[in-house]
Image (cartoon, rainbow, N blue to C red):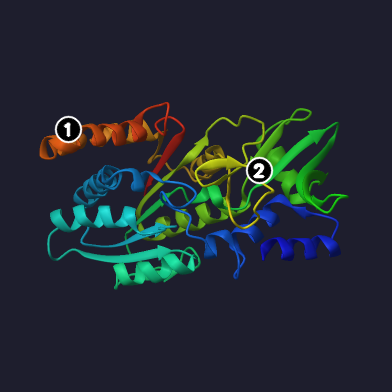
Amino acid sequence: MIKDKLLKYLHENHYIYLDEFIQLVHGDQDYGYYVSEKMIGKRGDFTTAPEISQMFGEVIAIKILHVINKNNIKHFNLIELGPGRGTLIDDILRVLNKHLSPETNISLHFNEINKNFIENLKLQFPKCNIHSVIGDYPDQYSFFIANEFVDALPLRQLMKRGKTYYETVVKKSLNGDLEFDIEIARTESEIYVKSRIDLKNNQIFEYSPQTIGAFNQIVNFLEKNKGYLLLIDYGYLKHPLKSTIQSIKNHKKTDVLNDIGKQDITYHVNFDCLISILENKKFLEYKFQTQSAFLKLNGIEERASQLCKQNPGKAEEIKTQLNRLIDNEHMGNLFKVLEVEI
């Protein structure tokens, strides 16, 4: 079990950095949460936007169609990072197959590590390609879709006390339980934070080197082959300078250090770190907005109205689904959308 592995590590080491802790808990090849658990849906730990309504995927498909028609694309990769049960890509493909000409060729790719999901994806999409690393795709125009993917990648937390920088770590307490603490920051962490912000005493700065690395790989791939990236996650542009880490089990918030390997550990994504990469590369074709703004701009309200007319008996259910996706009290403002077109 994950906790046993962690305790064994902490028996031999004084502490484990937060990002290393999350990597072990989420990605362990035998017991990692994202490797072995069935976490999505009503019977899982959380529900994503595609599971709420087909409209979410349909609107994304309309956006993809717009890009395809604008650039007259006939052959392309359709790549989803963390597809889970395949709900989103299924909705997207349904719309694309309905509107694209027969000569259009779609090469379908998934980056997924969950054993159960991989098996189901292969059955549902027999011609799909499964990848464990980002960037291993054919060299051609590519669409990248990442919905609630990067918020689960390993996170670092740094704070400043006096003139010294510290990082969040996990230790074994005197009574044998797990607890959070701080230790002197790694050099590369301190250098990165100093390049981003003048941190004040006890403020917390969060960033994910793994997310930055993955984002760079995608952008570099798009630079070479051209394409479009749609990254959707809950997060911020201006750092709140406090901890945003949380855990979810059975659709309820829990203690992060409980049920190790059996619950989702997540956080709010620091989009500023990603946008700075685009600006350093002088990319002008990117847009950052709320999920509500993106979905409205691409016709979700019109699609909801259409579905209500086609299914009057489900009109209230459709309206409820729409509100969950675009209302600011639900997902509308909390979730952000980063679009990059090269």
In-image side of 288 versus 214 (left or right)? left
In the image, residue 4 lies at what x, y percent?
73, 64
Q: Number of callouts in the render?
A: 2
Quadrant in which residue 140 is drawn = bottom left
Residue, disc 2: 255
Horizontal side, residue 193 vs residue 125: left or right: right
**In the displayed structure, would residue 35 be above or below residue 237?**
below
Q: Residue at x 14, y 66 (%)?
A: 103
Residue drawn 63% across and 44% down? Answer: 207
Quarter that holds the N terminus: bottom right
Q: Which residue lies under the disc numbered 1?
A: 305
Q: What residue do we see at 59% from left, 63% from top?
A: 32
Name the residue nearer the viewer: 33 or 227: 33
Kind of residue at disc 2: Asp
Q: Is residue 313 left or right of residue 108?
A: left
- Please, what secondary structure does the residue beneath circle 1 have? helix
Q: Position of residue 144 (x, y in %)?
A: 38, 54
Q: Earlier in the sequence, mark 1 or mark 2?
A: 2
